[in-house]
Structure formats: C-alpha cells, structure tokens
C-alpha cells in the first residue's frame, strides 16, 4: 500500500457542525478536539509517519475574544491531558507558528513537550498554532537577509535547500497529502512552501464527523494519484 508519509490536515467545519445542532461554536471546537484524538490514534495505527494539524491560524486571532479564549483553553487542556498520553505512547510532538503571541504558560508547556519528545522516533505530531505560512516565509527571508548582510553567507548561497532550512518545518518531510474537511477548497495560508507537490484532498465531511472511514477514503484517493513532481510518467513516449 502506497501510504503518504506526511499528512497535513486543515480541520475545518467545527462551527457549522455546532450550528447544525443548535449548539454554540465552542461546542464544535470541543467535539473537534475529540475527533483529533481519534484521528491521531488511527493515523499511527495505519503507519503514517507525520501528521501536521492546522489548529489555529495567524488570522484566527481576528475571531471574537470569547472564541479565541475557548480555543486557547482547549489547547491548554489538550497539552496537559491528551498530549501526555501521546508522550506515554512515545510520540514526538512539536509546534509551528508564532509562539510569542501565546500565553507564557502555554509556551512553557509547548517547549517542555518538544524537548521531552525530541528524540522519539516513529510517529510525529505537529500542531500549527498561531501559524501562517506567509509569516513563516517572511521569517526565513529575514534570517537569510541578516546572514547575507553580516557576511555569513552570500545572496548566491540562497537556494531551495538553504531557504527550506530556515522555515519552521525544516526537520520534517514535505506533506504528501493535504486533507481539508467541510467542503471548503482552499489552502488558507497553510504550509504554502511545503505543499508545492502535495496531493490535495477535499471532503465535505465536517471535522467533528471525520472518522476512520473518512480517513480511509482520503488514503484511497491518494493511492490513485500519480505523483510526477513536474516530470513525466516513466513509460510515457516523448
Ligand atoms: C475551523 O473550524 C477550526 C478551527 C479554527 C480550530 C481547529 C481546532 C480544533 C479542531 C480544536 C482542537 C484542537 C486542538 C489542538 C486541541 P471553524 O470554526 O472555522 O468552522 P466553520 O468554518 O464551520 O465556522
């Protein structure tokens, strides 16, 4: 079975899931957090190596204060309780995104988890919190500019490899498959550089309803894709 090594997921539709049930949006996020646990367990069982999840975007700060607060409380609880379980299972956990915008206690928990699990081999879970791909690309450009201005490197040293080495995703493989739930078909500033050759999969399923069957459907779709990275199929005549 041709499995993607790295799956990136845009967990969308929590709000609509709640609205359909006459519940507050925050109930949708809570249900989404439950789904996340189940999906990670299943992805590990399937032999996926890396899963990156878009939990909170750089643009999500614009949401009403109460919703941002609920999401931050959910992350806090998740890092305290559920991620502990991940650590027990030997899963490596890391984070990407503008950490300086998060509360100090959250940052502390994140740093601790990262260092605790840094050497774990096998399954790797990456949570994108306060993440925006354009921010990440600008940060990389700024670091390179500083190095060039100080003479540590020349502009000619800047290529795909040196650029990628300055992104927050530097030590992970590029995503092979990107899944977005809820029927929206856009990328929304997620892993723009990294998903250059990823296969995209959109499903109408709302994130809290995303289950093993929906996950299997995404994997089946991936298996049917022919990845050519801009080249030609092996046996194709010119
Ligand atoms: C998009 O749904 C989802 C989010 C902005 C947050 C994703 C967060 C979770 C799944 C909660 C748990 C995460 C962790 C790491 C504990 P939406 O609110 O945009 O839904 P809508 O488009 O239907 O309004």
Image (spheres, rainbow, N blue to C red):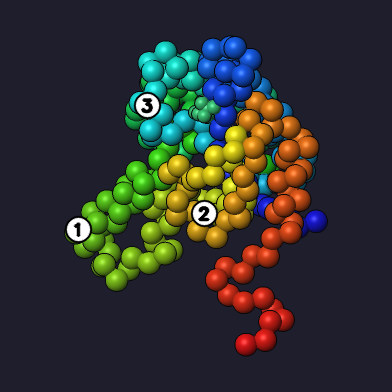
As drawn, the residue found furthest toward the left would be 149
As drawn, the residue found furthest toward the bottom would be 238
As drawn, the residue found furthest toward the right would be 1
Q: Nearer the viewer, mark 2 or mark 1?
A: 2
User: Is tag 2's residue or tag 3's residue first in the polypeptide sequence?
Assistant: 3
Residue placed under numbered mark 1 in the picture: 150
Q: Nearer the viewer, residue 104 or 97?
A: 97
Pinpoint residue 106: horizontal percent, then vertical percent: 45, 22
Q: Nearer the viewer, residue 39 or 220?
A: 220
Q: Residues within 10 Å of mark 2 (few under 14, many from 20)?
A: some
Figure quadrant of residue 59: top left
Image point 34% across, 30% down: which residue? 100
Location of residue 189 with respect to 161 vertically, above or below: above
Q: What element does badge 1 sit on?
A: loop
Q: What element does badge 3 sit on?
A: helix
Q: Residues within 10 Å of mark 1 (few under 14, many from 20)?
A: few
Q: Residues within 10 Å of mark 3 (few under 14, many from 20)?
A: some
Residue placed under numbered mark 2 in the picture: 195
């Amino acid at each position: 079975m041709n499995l993607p090594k790295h799956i990136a997921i845009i967990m969308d539709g929590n709000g609509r899931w709640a609205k359909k049930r006459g519940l507050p949006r925050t109930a949708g996020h809570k249900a989404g957090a439950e789904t996340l646990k189940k999906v990670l367990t299943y992805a590990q069982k399937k032999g996926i190596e890396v899963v990156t999840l878009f939990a909170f975007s750089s643009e999500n700060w614009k949401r009403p204060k109460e919703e941002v607060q609920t999401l931050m409380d959910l992350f806090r609880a998740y890092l305290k309780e559920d991620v502990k379980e991940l650590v027990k299972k030997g899963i490596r956990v890391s984070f990407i995104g503008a950490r300086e915008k998060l509360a100090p206690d959250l940052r502390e928990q994140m740093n601790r988890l990262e260092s605790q699990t840094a050497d774990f081999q096998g399954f790797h879970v990456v949570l994108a919190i306060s993440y925006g791909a354009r921010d990440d690309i600008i940060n990389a450009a700024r670091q390179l500019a500083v190095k060039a201005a100080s003479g540590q490197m020349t502009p000619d040293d800047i290529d795909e490899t040196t650029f990628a080495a300055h992104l927050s995703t530097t030590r992970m493989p590029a995503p092979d498959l990107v899944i977005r739930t809820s029927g929206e078909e856009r990328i929304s500033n997620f892993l723009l550089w990294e998903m250059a050759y990823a296969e995209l999969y959109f499903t109408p399923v709302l994130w809290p309803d995303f289950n093993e069957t929906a996950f299997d459907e995404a994997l089946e779709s991936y298996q049917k894709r022919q990845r050519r990275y801009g080249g030609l199929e092996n046996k194709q005549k010119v």
